[in-house]
Amino acid sequence: MTRGAALLVPESFTRLVFDDLKPAVYKGGEGNQIMLDSSTYGYWPESLFALHGRPLPLGPLLIYTLWAIGATTLAMLVRVGDDGEPTITLHVNVLGVSGTALFFLLVFRTNASYDRWWEGRKMWGDVTACCRNFTRQVIAHIGPEPRGALFAPASEPSAAERVDTLVRWAVAFAIVAKQHLRDERELSTTLRGIIRTTHAREVQAAKHRPLFVAERITMELAAAQRAGLLDSVEKMALDANLSAMVRAVTSMERIVRTRMPFAYIVHLRSFLVLWLLALPFTMVVYLNWGGVLACTLIAYSLLGLETIGVEVEQPFGRDYCDLPLDQLVDVLKSNLLEALKRHEVRTDGGAAWSGGDGGVAARGDDGADGGGGRGRGAAHANGAANGGACGGGAQYHGLPSRGGRVVRDVLLGRGPGSGSARRLYGGRQNSLIVLQ
């Protein structure tokens, strides 16, 4: 476009029109992003002048225009009588009565497709919410220190490592679910930096990859429970989120693999074609040659409605009007990794969580005693290595050592200055935590 023309035509208009004339390579959801980025009320300029995303059935429309020209020519050339009016015509009431039923079927078709599109968005919202809740609960329940054993074997992952693994598998679930819905098999780049390369290969080889990732998360949760990091109630809460994630993916699979009823589509399109074929013989009575243009505009409106139904009934692809899954996954990935980063900062250096009134967590180094915290009603405890333990003002029950591990439940008795009896939690670094 020349510079002089650019001065006469607004830049926003040229961008909308001429960018739309470029070859289209879609990632999915560009139409939604245009409306989100619009600076005008109601995004009228973006929608009125855009070509991408517009239902434009050029092939059927071109064929029908040729038919309208032929039918109008036939009606205008075949004349009987002195009035010179076309005689091959169709009364307008015929198309008026049948058109009401046709328009109802078209609107029902479009609404049914939109319901599928919106249900897909809601199901993906459920995946997002469950992944966020899962991450929040993993960080809160597992925390920075192992629970239920005073000393863990060196081969066991630390609590921080288990949190990192579980959160990253949750990120992988969202990525894998997106590609599963799009029937995309390549994962070498999308999972890079999220999980280990060996694990990514295992996911790649699985037939149902979201289910495989869910299995790995379940195994990690079971291992965390065996290590004393989770109790049964906490594990049930985490597993409930995981089950909801799998259920949401299953619902989205139902949308992908189930089309509109075939009989409905066949009858609707047959009805639509017959109605449009008869339309020129009605328009020629009132508009003569102008009926060609009228028929083309009416056909564009009706064929466009049917095209909208086709466009939005499968919302998980890479079409212009599909859901912006890439952006939704990127936002979720950023949220989860940000939460994981905050957790790493809080637990940096092996520090434990600190409490307020009612008890402060205590920490220590390998081979050293853990110092107790202070607070209203807080107990003071000291730990010793190699499976032995002693407590100030507390009595311990059942401390046999098994390969460096101690029986999980260590109970506190009541004593002066020790406060109410509470469960004692031990850390991987010989740390002792007393929760009031």
Image (tube, rainbow, N blue to C red):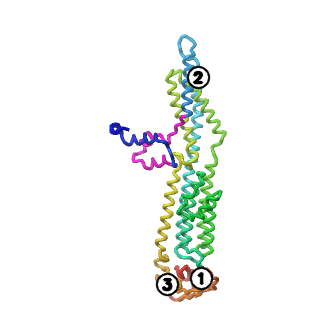
Tell me the number on the disc at residue 90: 2
- The residue type indicated by label 1 comes to Val
Q: Position of residue 182 (x, y in %)?
A: 58, 51
> In this view of the protein, can residue 281 be seen by the observer?
no
Tell which circle, 2 or 3, labels the residue nearer the N-terminal end. Answer: 2
Residue interval drawn in magenta: 29-58
Viewer-nearest residue: 284 or 97: 284
In this view, the mark in front (2 or 3) = 3
**Residue at 53%, 12% in the rendered image:** 83
**Residue at 60%, 76% in the rendered image:** 155
Crowd rating for badge 2 (residues with CA inside 10 Å; few <14, some 14–19, many 20+): some
What is the C-alpha distance between the residues marked 2 and 1?
A: 92 Å
**Residue at 63%, 39% in the rendered image:** 265
Crowd rating for badge 3 (residues with CA inside 10 Å; few <14, some 14–19, many 20+): many
Residue named by callout 1: 410
> In this view of the protein, can residue 430 be seen by the observer?
yes
What is the C-alpha distance between the residues marked 3 and 1?
A: 16 Å
Q: Position of residue 54 (x, y in %)?
A: 50, 40
**Element under label 3?**
loop
Asked whether 240 falls inside the magenta stretch, the response is no
Q: Position of residue 261 (x, y in %)?
A: 65, 42
- Residue placed furthest toward the right: 263
Q: Position of residue 351 (x, y in %)?
A: 48, 77
Tell me the number on the disc at residue 372: 3
